């Protein structure tokens, strides 16, 4: 059973920064893609950022230029650096991992609240 454990959420003022971490319970090279999704109240879950095994990245339009996804293979961890945060970034953020067999794994989610 794969476990993804997120950390780094919390309350931040508009314009501030946070870094999320997602630690996997196995070698992240076993996943084709790892990423971050978010879900705000009353809205569908949406892609924030994703990174594949080759290091290629993909971002949601609303976070391009502000968020950066990265991975540390030695620590089996994926990070999401979030800068210039806005109130509309408020959501529960979920870590995702997709296996070679196209199975999806999810973390428990971490709340990000951007408010003054």
Image (cartoon, helix red, strand yellow):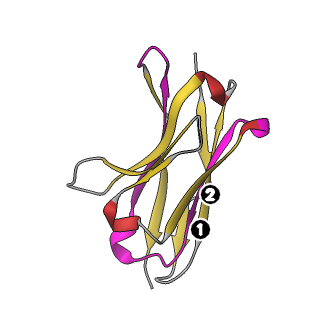
Residue 77 part of the magenta segment: yes
Residue 108 visible in the picture: no
Numbered disc 2: secondary structure: loop
**Dots 1, 2 in contact, CB < 8 A:** yes
The quadrant where residue 20 appears: bottom right
91 in magenta: yes
| 32 vs 65: above or below | above
Q: Please indicate, yes or no, whether residue 46 appears anywhere in the rendered image.
A: yes
Point 40% across, 66% down: residue: 63
Q: Where is residue 78 in the image (x, y as percent from the top left)?
A: 63, 45
Q: Does 30 sit left or right of 85 as displayed?
A: right
Q: Is mark 1 on a helix, strand or loop?
A: strand
| Residue depicted at x 79% and y 37% | 74
Residue at image mark 1: 18
**Residue 38 location in percent, x, y?**
38, 52
* Residue at image point 37% right, 76% down: 87
Farthest left residue?
42
| Residue interval drawn in magenta | 74-102
Classify residue 3 as left or right of residue 115.
Answer: right
Q: Mark 2 points at which residue?
A: 8
Question: Is 33 on the left or on the right of 90, as rendered?
Answer: right
Instruction: From this view, report whether residue 103 is shown above or below residue 58.
Output: above
Marks 1 and 2, how far apart in space? 7 Å
Q: Which of marks 1 and 2 is nearer the N terminus?
A: 2
Depth check, front residue: 50 or 12? 50
Q: Residue 102 carries which label?
A: none
Image quarter hosting the N terminus: top right
* 17 lies above or below 46: below
Q: 10 Å neighbourhood of mark 1: few (<14), some, or many (≥20)?
A: some
Density class for disc 2 (Cα within 10 Å; few <14, some 14-19, many ≥20) is: some
Count up the numbered dots. 2
Q: In this view, does 53 lie to the left or right of 97?
A: right
């Amino acid at each position: 059973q794969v476990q993804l454990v997120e950390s780094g959420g919390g309350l931040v003022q508009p314009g501030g920064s946070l870094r999320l971490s997602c630690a996997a319970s196995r070698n992240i090279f076993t996943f084709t893609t790892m990423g971050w999704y978010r879900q705000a109240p009353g809205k569908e879950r949406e892609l924030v950022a994703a990174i594949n095994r080759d290091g290629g990245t993909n971002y949601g339009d609303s976070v391009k230029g502000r968020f950066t996804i990265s991975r540390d293979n030695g620590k089996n961890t994926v990070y999401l650096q979030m800068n210039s945060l806005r109130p509309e970034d408020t959501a529960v953020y979920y870590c995702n991992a997709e296996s070679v067999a196209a199975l999806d794994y999810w973390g428990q989610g971490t709340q990000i609240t951007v408010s003054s």
